[in-house]
Image: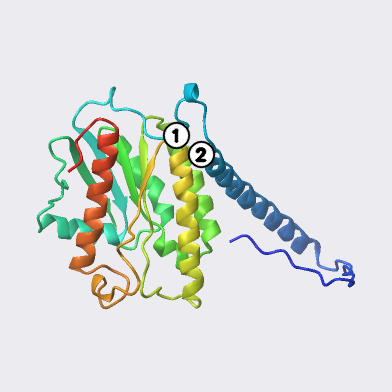
Amino acid sequence: MPPKKVQQKKGVRVLKQANKRPSSLQHQSSDDDEDLGTIRALVARVEALEKERRQPKDVDEGPSSGPVGLLSIPIPVRIILCGHSILFWAHRRASSSAPGTQLQLSATATVHWVARRGMLWDAFLPSVCRIMSSMDRPHILLIHLGENDLVQSPGVDLLVKVTRDLTWLINSYPHLIIVWSDMLVRRVWRGAIHPNRIERSRKWVNRKIRALVLSRGGAFIPHDRIRFHASHLFRGDGVHLSDQGCDLFLEDIMKGLRVLLSSLGGVDQA
């Protein structure tokens, strides 16, 4: 999160000491300030998009966000699911249970899974670009990533990367619909010194990315039933989902995609 401003006590004047650092450190400080300014600008942009989305529009103006129609998209709709181990194990579960890997959407869509255990956000864009060059371009891209990054770097750093890459992706493929699958709660954040801070960061980043994708005609899928206190939904490591947890996760994905396709005129809701 952005650094908090230091509050000065009333009646106390803070004097700045002369800067005696070497010039090399001064250059480093200047670079840090520039990076911080970029982060603040990106966060401000997301907040502005969220505020604009909430403002009422004139009747003649039409919707300010929301997916484009499927009138120009042939059936079946091509859907890519991209993510880390949560998606990897969900795919395993789907392949051996009732939903199947096509998530009961085979009449309207084809679902292609791109899941890699331990995947970090930096691997997302290269993976998607390889997909785009090796197969017919997808119409819908569902993303479930980010939890692994939260332990290694602040949430604001992840938000900067996501904003940068999704903006590039949407500008490069304007007809692509982005679906954000909310980052999940974890019972154990491996390697975390302050797990409560990571949990707060997870919620904050989810909110910002939701606003971003909605402002660009996308959608998001919440996972409100997967909660910290529901230990039976997690494996013993407190990170990965149990079979019951995977079932709930898959139900959320299936429902979210059905609602999206229905809103586009692609399939009726179950």
Mark seen at residue 65: 1
**Residue at 51% over, 64% down:** 153
Question: What is the count of numbered marks?
Answer: 2
Q: Is residue 81 above or below residue 13?
A: above
> Image check: 32 left or right of 8?
left
**Residue at 81% over, 67% down:** 21
Circle 1 packing at 10 Å, graded few (<14), some (14-19), many (20+), is: some
Q: Quadrant of the C terminus?
A: top left
Q: Please state which amino acid type lies under the numbered disc 2.
A: Arg
Mark 2 highlights which residue?
53
Observer-nearest of 219 and 117: 219
* Res 206 quadrant in image: bottom left
* Res 65 quadrant in image: top left
x and y percentages locating residue 223 in the rendered image: 32, 58
x and y percentages locating residue 146 in the rendered image: 41, 58
Q: Is residue 212 above or below residue 249?
A: above
Confirm whether residue 138 shows in the render: no
Observer-nearest of 4 and 270: 270
Q: Please state which amino acid type lies under the numbered disc 1.
A: Ser
